[in-house]
């Protein structure tokens, strides 16, 4: 065990690959440890801002969506055209590999292996034990030392479990999708430039299901935090009701997706987490790629300050910066998910709200810019009034149902 790295990044998804790339470009000695072949279930949507902020070439997009279709429990569909922009779509199998290869080309040492343990040297230096890909069964793990460890190893992060408080472990939405051969244009209404989102309780009792086109492939998936909910069955039902059961399944993937950011990202010494390990997946929408890469960049910058100064307090700045920029958006989306996804009655009302042109415009502006839109106060007032009307309608209909149930019980 002679290798000493400035930084060891565990996990080579968008967050980890971004952190490793940024640190390598800054001249740090970086190890990127990734378990080869692991692909996260993901619709693959990315905003144009991601392409600019992280210097991602357009050829990484396998498709461009120019609208989204929201489908209510009644099957009423509301189309939300993007306008002048687009939503980029990436295939995670290709996109993640591009990011890892770029980090390696810029100087990071890339190793395909499985993280096994976070240990300590005699002088307290962090030691990562890992098993290389293809290592003989029963062989001793390889151990390397790092001045700082960055855990980007997913929602159920082993690095986080080894270094952060167990009490801060976030709740999860389980996600599952099937990547299939794309149908021809127009098949049962399929459009290669449209993302379809299904707010239907039989497909997900607390989240949503999706059909996202990826060029010659399509992601069909679902998320839910309800224990025991059979997501494979839900995806099968969605494929059957949309005619997509006629097309070949290429691969399937499942993973836990965190519902909220961790309260703490660092151990106060030499470990920091980012991406899903830090819980940076947007509530309600489930969007995670942009936020993961942003958190990875902030973690890398915090790690760089720590390496320069030796002050572990520098590691705390990553979370502070992220929450200052995106905490309010996460809070609003969390409230939306809690309120609108609770029943089919509320989902029906939510999709109805999406017909409003002001809501559509503000939604896309917030998505493209990754911040709440504050430039159109009257539009926000109008939306508040409409939201309040929907809320009162929901409460009124709930009271009517309760009264009817009471009458039946008395009878």
Image: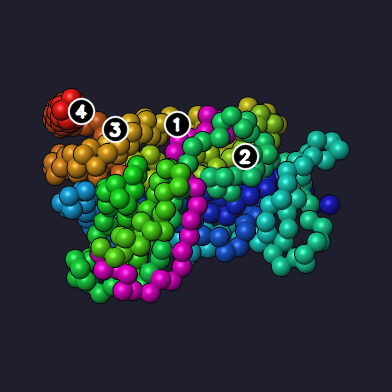
Mark 4 Cα shell of 10 Å, populated few (<14), some (14-19), many (≥20): few
Is residue 36 something one can see in this rendering?
yes
User: Mark 1 — residue?
Assistant: 323
User: Mark 4 — residue?
Assistant: 409
Is residue 56 something one can see in this rendering?
no
Label whose residue precedes the other's in the sequence (3 or 1): 1
Mark 3 Cα shell of 10 Å, populated few (<14), some (14-19), many (≥20): some
Label whose residue precedes the other's in the sequence (4 or 2): 2
Name above or below for residue 27 compared with residue 378.
Answer: below
Q: Nearer the viewer, mark 2 or mark 1?
A: 2
Q: Nearer the viewer, mark 2 or mark 3?
A: 3
Instruction: Using the numbered discs, state the Cα–Cα distance from disc 4 to disc 2 in whole angstroms.
Output: 51 Å
Instruction: Using the numbered discs, state the Cα–Cα distance from disc 3 to disc 1 in whole angstroms.
Output: 22 Å
Instruction: Using the numbered discs, state the Cα–Cα distance from disc 2 to disc 3 in whole angstroms.
Output: 30 Å
**Residues drawn in magenta:** 242-265
Classify residue 370 by image quadrant.
top left
* Residue 160: assigned label: 2
Label whose residue precedes the other's in the sequence (1 or 4): 1
Magenta stretch containing residue 262, yes or no? yes
User: Mark 3 — residue?
Assistant: 339
Left or right, 78 with reference to 308: left
Q: Circle 3 — which element?
A: helix
Instruction: Using the numbered discs, state the Cα–Cα distance from disc 1 to disc 4 in whole angstroms.
Output: 49 Å
Residue located 25% across and 63% down the image: 241
Residue that extends furthest to the right in the rendered view of this protein: 122
Q: Nearer the viewer, mark 4 or mark 3?
A: 4
Classify residue 395 by image quadrant.
top left
Give the x, y percent position of residue 100. Answer: 56, 59
């Amino acid at each position: 065990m002679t290798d000493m790295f400035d930084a060891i990044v565990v996990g080579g998804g968008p967050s980890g690959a971004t952190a490793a790339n940024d640190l390598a470009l800054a001249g740090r000695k970086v190890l990127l440890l990734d378990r080869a072949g692991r692909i996260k279930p993901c619709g693959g949507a990315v905003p144009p801002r991601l392409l600019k902020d992280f210097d991602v070439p357009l050829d990484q997009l396998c498709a461009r969506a120019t609208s989204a279709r929201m489908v209510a429990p009644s099957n009423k569909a509301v189309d939300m055209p993007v306008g002048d922009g687009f939503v980029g779509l990436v295939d995670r199998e290709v996109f993640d590999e591009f990011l890892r290869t770029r980090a390696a080309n810029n100087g990071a040492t890339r190793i395909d292996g499985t993280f096994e343990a976070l240990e300590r040297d005699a002088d307290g230096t962090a030691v990562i034990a890992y098993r290389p890909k293809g290592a003989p069964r029963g062989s001793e793990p390889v151990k390397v030392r790092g001045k700082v460890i960055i855990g980007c190893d997913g929602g159920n992060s082993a690095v986080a479990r080894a270094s952060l408080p167990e009490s801060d472990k976030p709740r999860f939405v389980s996600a599952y999708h099937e990547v299939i051969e794309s149908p021809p244009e127009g098949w049962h209404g399929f459009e290669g430039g449209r993302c379809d989102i299904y707010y239907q309780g039989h497909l997900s009792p607390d989240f949503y299901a999706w059909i996202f086109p990826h060029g010659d492939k399509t992601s069909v998936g679902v998320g839910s935090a309800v224990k025991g909910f059979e997501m494979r069955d839900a995806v099968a039902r969605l494929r059957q009701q949309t005619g997509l059961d006629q097309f070949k399944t290429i691969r399937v993937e499942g993973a836990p997706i965190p519902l909220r950011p961790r309260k703490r990202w660092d151990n106060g010494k030499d470990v920091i987490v980012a991406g899903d390990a830090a819980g940076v997946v947007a509530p309600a929408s489930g969007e995670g790629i942009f936020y993961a890469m942003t958190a990875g960049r902030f973690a890398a910058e915090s790690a760089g300050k720590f390496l320069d100064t030796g002050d572990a307090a520098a590691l705390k700045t990553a979370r502070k910066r992220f929450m200052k920029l995106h905490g309010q958006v996460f809070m609003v989306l969390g409230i939306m998910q809690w309120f609108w996804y609770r029943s089919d009655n509320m989902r029906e009302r939510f999709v109805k709200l999406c017909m409003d042109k002001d809501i559509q415009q503000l939604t896309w502006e917030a998505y493209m810019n990754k911040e709440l839109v504050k430039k159109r106060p009257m539009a926000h007032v109008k939306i508040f009034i409409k939201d309040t009307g929907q809320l009162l309608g929901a409460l009124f209909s709930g009271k009517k149902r309760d009264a009817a149930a009471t009458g039946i019980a008395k009878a």
